[in-house]
Amino acid sequence: MLAKTHRRARPFAFKPLAAALLGALALPAQSAEFTGLGFLGTGTSSWATGVSADGSVVVGTSDNGSATEAFRWTQATGMQSVKNWLAGAGVSIGAWRLTEATGVNGNGTVVVGYGTDPSGNDQAWLARVGPAGSGFLGNIPAFNATLVETGSRAAQAGAGISNLTMFGAHHRSLLDSGLARTQDGACAWATADAARHDKTDTRMELAEVGVCKDIGSARLGAGVGQAWARQDWSLSGGAKYDGQYLYLEAANAFANVKGLEGSLAGYYGRFDTRLNRPGPSHSPSAPMPPATAVMRLGA
């Protein structure tokens, strides 16, 4: 969390410390020189509060003639408001007012600061323009909530897909599935199922085919399936899961006890998981292949 500090405007281009850092990083010691950053609009004062690792990007606050405004400066662009910097990348901040920039990351692509949100509340913000994605984040509490969603709800989706297979498509054993049983005969099945979990806003579907073999009073079966799941998260984030699974089952009818059957079922699946983390960039992460294994014993 950023700690906000109040600063008094100075009729000086930027703080001496920032100027010294710029000179030391950008120029040989014997030719160091002082460079004014300028002002926004008709302003007459500005001050720097952050410098990128190589000194090529400076951020801070400038008087624009009517109020203070966050700026970003480079040698190529000169001083420009963070709002215009974002607009150049196609990012709109709506009715936000970015009143001060307090820091910048090492390569100058991320700027943080404080401003006033559309409801008139003072809020911290984060802005990014770069190859990894461009965007603006102003709702920090909501963003923090998505960190919990990423960990907990992603795991719940993996468990939900396996449950849909074991207790949805295969809620009955292969002997109780309606497939005719014959001595040493063979059978096959095709099934599909779908479900929605409202609490985690997860939608799941599967399609499966399989074959089975009757051996005496037992039936052995094996199936393969394709499964999908989708989740919607806060701040337009979400997750997608796509993968295949293997289903195996052995079921037996006990001749000495009428109507009694036993079954042992196993499930193994691997899924590409694509997490679309909310924030300044909504670029999906690289796919991750989690594996899920489940065993079920029933009678």
Image: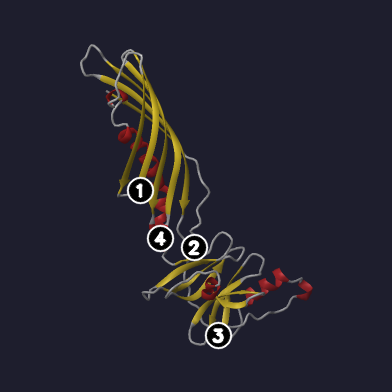
First reached walking from the N terminus: tag 1 or tag 2: 1
Q: Which mark is residue 280?
A: 2
Above-or-below relation of 51 to 186: below
Q: What's under tag 1, amino acid-wise?
A: Thr
Q: Position of residue 100 (x, y in %)?
A: 50, 75
In three-dimensional space, the C-alpha distance between marks 4 and 2, rounded to whole angstroms, equals 10 Å
In three-dimensional space, the C-alpha distance between marks 3 and 1, rounded to whole angstroms, equals 49 Å
Q: Position of residue 291 (x, y in %)?
A: 46, 36
Q: Secondary structure at mark 1?
A: strand
Contact between labelled residues 2 and 3, with CB atoms less than 8 Å apart: no
Q: What's under tag 2, amino acid-wise?
A: Pro
Q: Which mark is residue 202?
A: 1
Left or right position of 148 against 110: left
First reached walking from the N terminus: tag 4 or tag 2: 4
Q: What's under tag 3, amino acid-wise?
A: Gly
How busy is the neighbourhood of tag 2: few (under 14 within 10 Å), some, or many (20 plus)? many
Q: Secondary structure at mark 3?
A: loop
User: Could you tell me if residue 102 is visible in this image?
Assistant: yes
Q: Nearer the viewer, mark 3 or mark 4?
A: 4
Residue that sits furthest to the right in the current view: 30
Q: Position of residue 43 (x, y in %)?
A: 55, 86
First reached walking from the N terminus: tag 3 or tag 2: 3
The residue where tag 3 is placed is 41
Quarter of the picture holding the C terminus: top left
In three-dimensional space, the C-alpha distance between marks 1 and 4, rounded to whole angstroms, equals 16 Å
Q: Which mark is residue 235?
A: 4
Q: Residue, x 26% and y 20% (percent of image)?
A: 261
Contact between labelled residues 2 and 1, with CB atoms less than 8 Å apart: no
How busy is the neighbourhood of tag 3: few (under 14 within 10 Å), some, or many (20 plus)? some
How busy is the neighbourhood of tag 1: few (under 14 within 10 Å), some, or many (20 plus)? many
Above-or-below relation of 41 to 294: below
In three-dimensional space, the C-alpha distance between marks 3 and 4, rounded to whole angstroms, equals 33 Å
